[in-house]
């Protein structure tokens, strides 16, 4: 049995990143390969990224009572940070098959990768120039790029070094059509557009995972999950009035917002995130993976664009490709759109479109790994 190493992002306390890393490993394993996720420390390339977490850990451990008295808002932030750190760590310990020890540099990665027959880089925004790390274009052994996302719309934001490393990778794919076109221009080779790995794991499996913990909320509710600054308060208020449902706001410590709602939930790791979407009556989000799991659980969905189209670093292209691939465009909310109580979605049609793209994606990865 071939051994496959997976190199992807999973830090950052983002539900989508954590779940796509799990899905990438499950997808590869289900195809009949033995695989592990390379335990790369994503902060090792930039020591400054470690400073703030280090300081906040000290604040929580040693100065919590003082902060509680003098700075309640800071205490609240540190409290939900601790909650979410714990939830994400528990998920990783339970669901990830990681290499050991932690890898902090290219040389360590080189040694660890030698025990694998192939290396899969992907998915998530590992090729985004906004958080560029050359490790995610590592090419010592047979490397297959599966669904990396570039994110930005301006090809000139991609550095010469990144372009050179990209050209060395034999098997190229991307998660969004716009990214595939960029990679083609850079490498002068074909680049397959493939599905995010969370779509390559079937809905039944995600339902089982979501159901593995008690329901967070029993009454009908609208779950809101916004990663951008705009929480679309007017739309949410109108939807609440129209449906009579409560509004639950999933809030991350690194994405604080001021959405007016019936309840804000902060003790939310990847499993709780799945559970909240699965049991919601309605979902409002600007999240790529929030959209995918709403699709898996067949929810009524209002999807908002997180970025303005004129922004050079806008990341809307992955959303557009996702909606096009799934024939799911109906869920996208434009600026003047009003809420709809009974906006039914033809999920049978969407699933037929998904199967076509899933077959192409599966064919791509099998061909790459078997040829290697």
Image (spheres, rainbow, N blue to C red):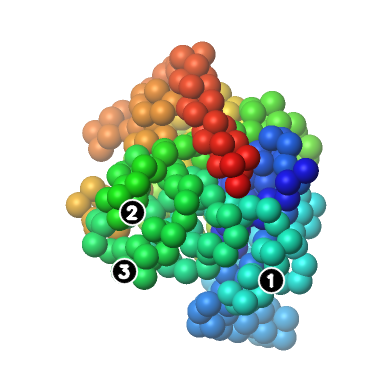
Q: Choose the circle earlier in sequence order: 3 or 1.
A: 1
Residue in view at x 40 percent, y 48 percent: 231
Left or right: residue 70 versus residue 171 is: right
Q: Residue at x 67, y 63 (%)?
A: 113
Kindly identify which numbered label has been placed on residue 111: 1
User: Could you tell whether 214 is left or right of 88 in the image?
Assistant: right
Q: How many marks?
A: 3
Residue farthest toward the left in the current orientation of the protein? 310
Give yes or no for contact between labels 3 and 1 (Cβ–Cβ under 8 Å). Answer: no
Name which of mark 1 and mark 2 comes first in the sequence: 1
For the N terminus, give its image quadrant.
top right
Question: How busy is the neighbourhood of tag 3: few (under 14 within 10 Å), some, or many (20 plus)?
Answer: few
Q: Is residue 323 left or right of residue 154?
A: right
Q: Nearer the viewer, residue 188 or 219?
A: 188
Q: Are marks 1 and 2 in contact (CB under 8 Å)?
A: no
Task: Read off the residue under disc 2.
Answer: 187
Quick check: 118 above or below 356?
below
Q: Is residue 61 visible?
A: yes
Q: Name which residue lies at 79% across and 52% down.
A: 94
Image position, residue 197 (x, y; %):
57, 40
The secondary element bearing badge 3 is classed as helix
Q: Element at badge 2?
A: helix
Tell me residue 290's x, y (percent): 51, 40
Closer to the chain start, of discs 2 and 3, is: 3
Q: Nearer the viewer, residue 110 or 156?
A: 110
* Within-10-Å neighbours for mark 1: few <14, some 14–19, many 20+: few
Q: Nearer the viewer, mark 2 or mark 3?
A: 2
The local crowd at label 2, few if under 14, some if 14 to 19, many if 20 or more residues have their Cα within 10 Å, is some
Element type where label 1 sits in the image: helix
Cα separation between marks 3 and 1: 26 Å
The residue tagged 3 is: 160
């Amino acid at each position: 049995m071939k051994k496959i190493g997976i190199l992807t992002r999973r830090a950052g306390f983002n539900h989508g990143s954590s779940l796509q890393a799990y899905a990438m490993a499950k997808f590869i394993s289900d195809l009949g390969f033995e695989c592990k996720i390379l335990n790369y420390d994503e902060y090792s390339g930039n020591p400054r990224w470690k400073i703030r977490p280090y300081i906040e850990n000290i604040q929580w451990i040693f100065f919590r009572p003082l902060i509680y008295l003098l700075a309640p808002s800071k205490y609240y932030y540190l409290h939900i940070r601790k909650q979410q750190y714990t939830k994400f760590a528990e998920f990783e310990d339970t669901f990830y098959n990681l290499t050991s020890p932690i890898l902090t540099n290219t040389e360590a990665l080189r040694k660890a990768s030698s025990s694998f027959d192939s290396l899969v880089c992907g998915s998530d925004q590992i090729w985004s120039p906004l958080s560029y790390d050359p490790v995610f274009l590592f090419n010592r052994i047979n490397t297959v790029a599966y669904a990396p996302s570039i994110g930005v719309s301006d090809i000139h934001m991609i550095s010469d070094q990144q372009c050179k490393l990209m050209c060395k990778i034999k098997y190229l794919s991307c998660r969004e059509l716009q990214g595939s076109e960029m990679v083609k221009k850079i490498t002068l080779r074909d680049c397959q557009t493939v599905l995010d790995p969370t779509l390559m794991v079937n809905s039944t499996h995600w339902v089982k995972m979501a159901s593995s913990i008690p329901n967070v909320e029993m009454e009908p509710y609208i779950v809101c999950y916004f990663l951008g600054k705009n929480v679309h308060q007017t739309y949410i208020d109108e939807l609440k009035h129209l449906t009579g449902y409560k509004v639950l706001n999933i809030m991350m410590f690194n994405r604080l917002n001021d959405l007016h709602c019936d309840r804000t939930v902060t003790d939310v790791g990847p499993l709780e995130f799945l559970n909240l979407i699965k049991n919601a009556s309605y979902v409002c989000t600007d999240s790529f993976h929030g959209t995918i799991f709403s699709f898996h659980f067949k929810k009524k969905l209002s999807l908002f664009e997180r970025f303005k189209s004129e922004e050079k670093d806008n990341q809307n292209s992955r959303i557009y490709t996702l909606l096009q691939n799934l024939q799911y465009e109906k869920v996208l909310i434009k600026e003047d759109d009003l809420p709809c109580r009974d906006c039914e979605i033809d999920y049978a049609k969407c699933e037929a479109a998904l199967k076509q793209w899933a077959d192409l994606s599966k064919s791509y990865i099998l061909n790459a790994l078997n040829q290697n």
